[in-house]
Amino acid sequence: MAKISKVVKNNKRKVRVELWRARRLGAKKVINNPKSTIEEVDAAVLKLQKMPRDGSPIRVRNRCSQSGRTRGYLRKFGVSRIALRDLALQGQIPGVVKSSW
């Protein structure tokens, strides 16, 4: 089990990313636009730098929905490898069966 404080902190980051998404995209669009003037780009860079760090989607960590574990996370299922094995053995994931050959 992950520390509850880390899971809560990550959830707060997810909320903050959603709040700042439109403003960050607007600033990045100006920065990456080749037709923008140097002054516009500089202003957009300053605006982006003043935004909170936790508003960046890079700072959000994928976590297992069962245990909060970050390592061994499988995107397709949204859980860690350990939780996936437990759920698969219980038959709670449709189409996943234990391999045998």
Image (tube, rainbow, N blue to C red):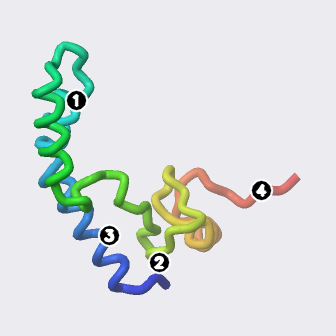
Which numbered disc, 3 or 2, marks the residue that appears first in the sequence?
3
Give how far apart the Cα atoms at labels 3 and 2 are.
14 Å
Measuring 19% from the left and 40% from the top, which residue is drawn there? 45
Give how far apart the Cα atoms at labels 1 and 2 are.
39 Å
Which numbered disc, 3 or 1, marks the residue that appears first in the sequence?
3
Which numbered disc, 4 or 3, marks the residue that appears first in the sequence?
3
- Camera-near label (1 vs 2) is 1
Q: Residues within 10 Å of mark 2 (few under 14, many from 20)?
A: some
Q: Which mark is residue 10?
A: 3
Residue 18 placed where, x, y %?
18, 53
Q: Are marks 3 and 2 in contact (CB under 8 Å)?
A: no
Q: Is residue 99 above or below residue 12?
A: above
Q: Residues within 10 Å of mark 3 (few under 14, many from 20)?
A: some
Measuring 14% from the left and 54% from the top, which residue is drawn there? 50
- Camera-near label (3 vs 2) is 3
Farthest residue, direction right: 101
Instruction: Identify residue type, mark 2.
Output: Ser
**Circle 4 sits on which residue?**
99
Which numbered disc, 2 or 4, marks the residue that appears first in the sequence?
2
Residue 35 image-quadrant placement: top left
**Circle 2 sits on which residue?**
67
Q: Which mark is residue 73?
A: none
- Camera-near label (3 vs 1) is 1
Q: Are marks 4 and 3 in contact (CB under 8 Å)?
A: no
Residue 74 placed where, x, y %?
54, 57
